[in-house]
Amino acid sequence: MVLKELFYFLIFPGMIFSVVMGGILSWSDRKITARVQFRKGPPFLQPFYDLGKLFYKETILPKFGSKFTFLAAPVFALFSATMANVFILLPSIFPGSGFRGDLIVVFYLLTIPSLTYIIGALASGNPLGALGASREMKLIISYELAFILALTAIIIKSGMSLRISDILAVQQDGGAFIGSISGALLFIVIMFVNQAKLALVPFDMSEAESEIVHGVFIEYSGSAYAMIRMARYIMLFALPSLLITLLMSGFTLSGVGILWAVLKLVLVLLLITLIRNTNPRVRIDQAMRFFFIWMNLLAIVAIGLSLINL
Amino acid sequence: MGLGSYCFKKSLWVFHFGGASCNNCDIEILDCLTPKYDVERFGIQLVGTIRHADVMLVSGSINRKCRDRLLEVYNQAPRPILVVAFGSCGCTGGVFAEGNTFAGPVDKIIPVDAYIPGCPPKPEAILAGIVKLINK
């Protein structure tokens, strides 16, 4: 029993599988970016070369700052991203699994990586890291409300159920939520929230390379940075999976369903990459205004529409 | 050759240290990222911080003010780190070699793994230098 849960956590929907999937998605992201810019792009194994190299290099600890917190932050980021991915994928693999309220657990687990980046950056004692941490904090404050409102609308649409497997069952009976008007609005909201959670352009101000040189990650090197990269690969897989599970009737892993699952994942990733390639970086106050006014408005309209079954 | 050093050669992240450069070398480095030369094919990326870097490109002549900064940045880098002296000024000092404020070419201050001469080096020369660095 314990062995089975360890297997779930470490190997199949957990750490190894999701790092490999996230690496492939990260390669596709870089390759699509390169094709958009008429370049050739990196080779297929590039994300794994990067990881291998980072594990090979030296890890430097900060002289002025908390060394333990600095090293613990990437571990927690990797752990919580993996746990979130397991809870998102298990209801798709074994229909009916999961527990009451796992949607809320996933919501909190998906916030923890951003929080640990803030804690690690503040523990490094670097002023640019602190600047990145403050921007990341403002970004979290702005997108979390829109995200929880969107989840509320989904809970209302699925008949007040807090279980991911129930949400999947409702969609498999009555069609995917994205087919309705409120579902389409929710898709837009969760898409932009994903963009901010993944810290991709236009919401990458917390690690803006050209102004605050990778911001929150400025002091990380070697294995610690490799763990952050792994956590980011997993998030790049987990957030589109959550979007597909909540709105596009999830993954069916049998027969032709596998093809559909891959197609849905590629579609969502393509949208994320194209948004990232066609937009400039916005300022933090513009991002906060965007989420507080427009995304919250869309989510509240979606809640109203889903209350009258549209 | 172990797995670690194999991966290291496949994903070199480059940090660019500009000494007292005239900016011409800096522009040629950016040329390598354009569609025609595209060094991302080999896994090479420009990074902003020395903590993530595997290769340190030093361009421009190093004068007395730059010298201490160069040493400090080199000491902050995670090992293993490769150093490339870039352009005539980085390799030998160029026309500034006999100047009053000149503090020696890069290899007098820190160990250098590859030299890419030229004023500025052409992108083809930079790619050739990278190949030599990888096969070293």
Image: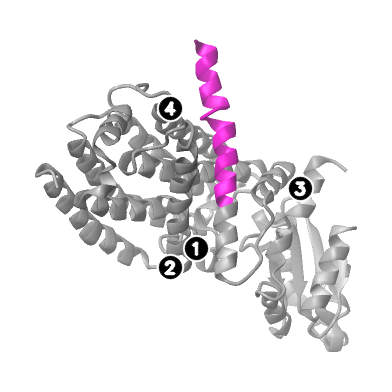
Instruction: Name the mark on residue A90.
Output: 4
Q: Earlier in the sequence, mark 4 or mark 1?
A: 4
Would residue A78 appear left or right of B76 to someone viewing this image?
left
3D distance between C-alphas at marks 2 and 4:
35 Å
Task: Tell me whether the residue at label 2 lies in contact with that at label 1, contact meaning CB atoms closer than 8 angstroms.
Answer: yes
Question: Farthest residue in the top direction?
Answer: A1
Q: For the magenta stretch, what is the residue range? A: A1-26
Same-subunit check for callouts 2 and 1:
yes
Residue under numbered circle 1 = A208
Q: Residues within 10 Å of mark 2 (few under 14, many from 20)?
A: some
Q: CA distance from mark 2 to mark 3?
A: 32 Å
Closer to the camera: disc 1 or disc 3? 3
Q: To which residue does mark 2 refer? A: A281
Q: Main secondary structure of the magenta part?
A: helix
Q: How is the image coloured?
A: one colour
N-term-proximal mark, 2 vs 1 = 1
Q: Residues within 10 Å of mark 4 (few under 14, many from 20)?
A: some
Q: Give, as a three-letter code, the residue at label 3.
A: Cys
What kind of residue is marked 1? Ala
Q: Most extreme residue toward the left, as rendered? A: A308
User: Secondary structure beneath disc 2?
Assistant: loop
**Front disc: 2 or 1:** 2
When the figure is inspected, residue A150 is found, relative to residue A276, above or below; the finding is above
As drawn, the residue found furthest toward the front would be: A256
- The image shows a total of numbered marks equal to 4
